[in-house]
Image: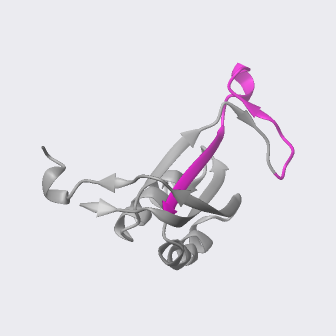
Amino acid sequence: MTRLTGRALRVTIFIGENDTWHHKPLFSEIVHRAHRAGLAGASVFRGIEGFGATSLIHTSRLLSLSEDLPVAIIIVDTEDRVRAFLPELDELVGEGLVILDDCEVIRYIGRDEQQEGV
């Protein structure tokens, strides 16, 4: 069983929904690399409205502007493991925002790989 409690580091990556890496969604590539790196977990959240460095507002409310909505990928693990993953993000994220926050994990208990099919 995987456990993570106490001090941790959260990395949040803000990109556009249409950003790609070798013709695949960039958010998917980040999640798969985080998985291969053995990080505790990663989640992708699709925004309904936002703007970035271009100051162009992207929103799901207007049909003509509903493309390339903001996406946030959040990964939490120990500081050492997250910092070891940062070079992967340097390679992948050409445009976007990557932030790090100290956080405290209250409860995280993952299943063993053998139990995942149960």
Instruction: Give the vertical position of 16 relative to 99 (above or below).
Output: above
Which x, y percent locates residue 22?
49, 61
Q: In which quadrant will I find the N terminus?
A: bottom left
The residue depicted at 75 percent of the width and 38 percent of the height is 50
Q: In which quadrant will I find the C terminus?
A: top left
The residue depicted at 55 percent of the width and 59 percent of the height is 104
The residue depicted at 71 percent of the width and 59 percent of the height is 97
Which x, y percent locates residue 16?
65, 47
Decide whether residue 46 is among the magenta residues: no
Residue 112 appears left or right of 23: left
Instruction: Give the vertical position of 17 relative to 93 (above or below).
Output: above
Residue 46 appears left or right of 118: right
Residue 26 appears left or right of 2: right
Instruction: Give the vertical position of 8 relative to 56 (above or below).
Output: below
Nearer-the-camera pick, 90 or 108: 108
The answer to whether any part of residue 56 appears in the image is yes
Identify the image quadrant of residue 20.
Answer: bottom right
Find the magenta span and give its range: 53-76
